[in-house]
Image: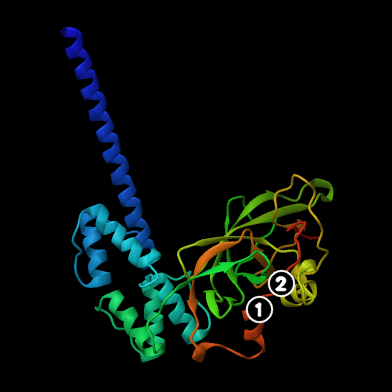
Amino acid sequence: MKKKLTLLFFIFVQLLFASIAYSADNTSSTIVQMDKAEAIIYGEVKRGGLIERLNDMETALFGRSLPGSISERQMQLLNFIQTGSAELPSLLFKLGVAEWAVSQTTQPFIPALGRIQKLEQNIDGTVHEGRPIGTRTERILSILLTNPVTQIEVLVSTDKAIRGRFLESAGPGFSRKGDSIKIELAEDFIEDDNLIAPKGSQIVAEVAEVIRPGAFGRPGRVRFELKYLQILGPEELKVKFADPRKISGGGEKNVAAAAGASMVGAVLLGPLGLATGLLIRGDSLEVGAGTEFYLQLDEAARVSAFPIPSGLRRTDGPADDNNNNKSTESIDSDLFIIP
């Protein structure tokens, strides 16, 4: 009898600790979700208790608090802001479409609230403070577009080459491994009159390797790796550097002309075992802000896109290039070396 009681007590203690651990993990996950939502909307994480922050965020977005448990309300928030659905695209999707309709570019490096304020200033000459963010977004779209914004699923393949652009300088003399690099799309990513990612969309990348210049003239080097492209939809497209020699229409010349002296150089195949990426070498060379290059998808994917209304489709030369993003042949290597 005593052994049975001891065993039951042991099981009870284990279940109690498991419950506490689960509760702690769940609370931690909820806080992370709240931090993420605030960072997207405000560009910073707010202070205060979780329930207070949740109420404030719901009021800012909808003008009222939502029903349900804390977890359910968190999911509704992130779904509204980032995920959306075919019938109701996300806030970020709609903001990207609105910015593209107004200025043919998007501004993902600015918090969502700041993007709305810029759109209002551009359209009305004034900012409509105090109104719910959701209402303000819908008002902007009703002014710009005849029909509500919708999204459809589009298949994108790896044979598309799109131009990217560095927004800041990087080089072996001052970059550090792990540094994030600000890169954007230099043109619209369009497939069959469906907008997948507007010009200005963020390309997430980082410095993967840095070797400082050494003694006796030993050159330094820095290697960049592309992670993914943030598109209108919630999907993250894995991308990589494309070899401009394999791009139809004189890709290598186009890259060199667009990038200037910092991008002029041979395009070489990387040795086996070297991770793919953009590699520059030299004592003082750098990739300057404004340097352009070609990238392509790492793998085919189905993504959410905005079906462009006929009134917004561009038929001039540059837009035609965007609609038919340069095609590539089979890529042997995606390593650029700039000597």
**Looking at the image, can residue 207 be seen?**
yes
Answer left or right for 97 relative to 338.
Answer: left
Q: Residue at x 61, y 67 (%)?
A: 168
Judge whether 124 appears above or below 267 on screen: below
Kind of residue sitting beneath label 2: Ser
x and y, in percent, of residue 305 in the image: 49, 73
Judge whether 265 appears above or below 69 on screen: below
Q: Residue at x 60, y 61 (%)?
A: 300
x and y, in percent, of residue 306 in the image: 48, 76
Q: Identify the residue under disc 2.
A: 327
Secondary structure of the residue carrying numbered label 2: loop
Q: Which dot marks residue 324?
A: 1
The residues tagged by marks 1 and 2 sit, at their Cα atoms, a distance apart of 8 Å
x and y, in percent, of residue 297 in the image: 63, 63
Kind of residue sitting beneath label 1: Asn
CA neighbours of label 2 inside 10 A, class few (<14), some (14 to 19), many (20+): some
**Looking at the image, can residue 42 be seen?**
no
Q: Residue at x 65, y 85 (%)?
A: 320
Q: Looking at this view, is 195 or 129 the one in front? A: 195
Question: Image quarter for residue 227?
Answer: bottom right
Secondary structure of the residue carrying numbered label 1: loop
Q: Are marks 1 and 2 in contact (CB under 8 Å)?
A: yes
